[in-house]
Amino acid sequence: MLNDGLRWIDCACALVGACLAYNWLSEKRKRRARGGLPLPPGPRGLPFVGNIFDIDPGRPWETYTEWTKQYGEIAYMKLFSQDVIVLNSERVVRSLIDQRSAIYSDRPEVPTNKLFGADFNTAFLPYDDEWKLHRKLFHNTLHAETCISYQPLILQRVHILLGDLLKNPGSASFEPHLRMFTASIILAVTYGYQAVAWSDDLVQCAAKLVKLLIDALPPHRAAVLGAFPILTRLPTWFPGAGFLRDAVKGRELARHALEDPFEYVKQQMAAGTASRSMVSDLLTEVDEKQLTPEMERAMKAMASTVFLAGFDTSSSFMFTFILAMRMHPDVQRRAQAEMDAVLGGGRLPTFEDRPSLPYIEAIIREVLRWQIILPLSLPHATSSDDVFEGYFIPKGAMVLPNVWAMVRCVPLPPNQPPADVFEPARHLDPSTGQLLPEQNAITGHPQFGFGRRVCPGRFLSEATMWAAIASILAVFDVCPALDGEGREVPVSGEYSTGISIRPLPFECEIRPRSKKAEQIILEALDV
Ligand code: HEM
């Protein structure tokens, strides 16, 4: 019995020894391949697991920001066998991802994408011909000029949102209205589909798929499954393998999200009743010969990606805006004074008013600066070895742009409030009230990513954000919710964690500013 035990211990020691020796040898081989160049500095990891325990899994961007003190703008770590390069300043991100985009435009392979049926998503595709075709289709349908033609549709959807907020003003209902607003704009622009309720089949299918993917794919799970792909083959009843049951649901939802709305457009076009949309434009442009199975697959995939990539990000932006207004009534008053001076208090804003409303521009920039929806953007990957400022960057490395650090942790001019304070006026020239000349276009903001993988939905997002923010502030006050005894319900201002973040649920009342404001909304809805 004792001998049996010793034999097991011997075997275990031999196995661990062999793993360590293999690790050491492969590291030595890699060092030789680097031609003696060092990797960027970073924390020493543990054998085999690497730096997995050095990171705060809830807010890893804060860990990486902390590292700048010791390692500077670029850091190296290892997650199991995956090389990871963390870029902690806009300077290095622009130098690498923008200026060397031929090397930095790949994506790391995440086994869960395929498992959940989401590997069609443009955002997850490797840097290959299929991805290039998707981007071409995105360019044809969502570039800056095309988005101008969506302005009437955006305003129509914004007016419906104002009507919904007017009809159901309770503190529990603003979240569903904002969600419905983003979902309905996306489905209208992509498929010409007029969703009227959250219970709509298409809305439900797409929203459930987004939720499943976000809940099921936290980065630590992706890292573990990347290191042990065998785990994706466990039976669904296996203890701890609950995510595999979600994966079955995910594949079913993904199939519907790809096929159903695309078929809807084809049927509407055949009947001559299709509204203009991204998909109808694409189908009109190609003749029968060009509509190869490959082309049709790409069209379905890029169209489905619009919801997956645009719904959660856009909703998060809107929730942050409402939270900021709830916390800063002074900002609302100043925005409303600007709006009343331009609109005369008698109508809703249109896109023609935009140049006359610099404070609204400043609010959008401040919402983008204040909370970063994707604090680590989406991970890029290198498709060949590279050398940057004397450091070796290996092929296949995951590259994480720390947008949080580059937007929230940069030194501010001495006259500006601290970075965590929401203050739109920081974007304006105090003497003229106009945007500061160095204010870049919103669509160039680091929040929308970098290089060849920059968000193709940024022009649509910018137009939607502007119309929604300007219209809400023109006719509504965002006020504190009151409890049963008439006291203000406080808001914590806390955020969720994960790849994309959003404010934790909070309460507020969105009330019409006046009887006249109510009338303006009803007139816009033609009620
Ligand atoms: C506030 C709203 C949004 C934010 C903050 C945002 C942000 C981002 C970011 C950071 C990326 C990754 C870029 C990179 O890898 O460097 C991205 C990718 C992407 N976004 Fe957006 N996005 C938003 C809305 C939208 C919308 C409305 C759409 C669709 C119309 C969209 C479509 C995409 C797609 C398809 C990709 C993948 C691009 C690729 O991998 O080539 N996004 N977005």
Image (cartoon, helix red, strand yellow):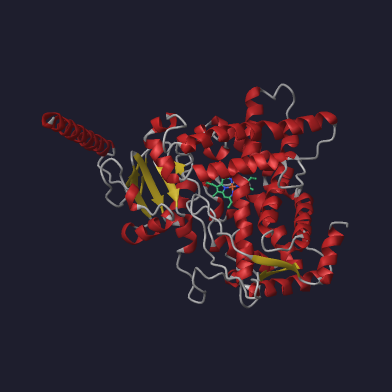
Describe residue 176's horizontal placement relative to residue 116 as left or right: right
Q: Can residue 301 be seen in this view?
A: yes
Is 283 placed above or below 202 here?
above
Quarter of the rendering containing residue 393: top left
Quarter of the rendering containing residue 320: bottom right
Q: Residue at x 53, y 45 (%)?
A: 214
Q: Residue at x 84, y 70 (%)?
A: 516
Between 38 and 271, the one nearer to me in the picture: 271
Quarter of the rendering containing residue 22: top left
Between 239 and 211, the one nearer to me in the picture: 239
Q: Position of residue 77 (x, y in %)?
A: 33, 47
Q: Position of residue 147 (x, y in %)?
A: 71, 48
Quadrant for the N terminus, please: top left
Instruction: In the displayed orientation, state which residue is furthest to the top.
Output: 289
Q: Residue at x 62, y 31 (%)?
A: 255
Is 325 placed above or below 100 here?
below
Is 391 placed above or below 107 here?
below
Q: Where is residue 73 in the image (x, y as percent from the top left)?
A: 38, 56
Number of callouts in the render? 0
Between 435 and 155, the one nearer to me in the picture: 155
Quadrant for the C terminus, please: bottom right
Q: Can residue 139 be seen in this view?
A: no
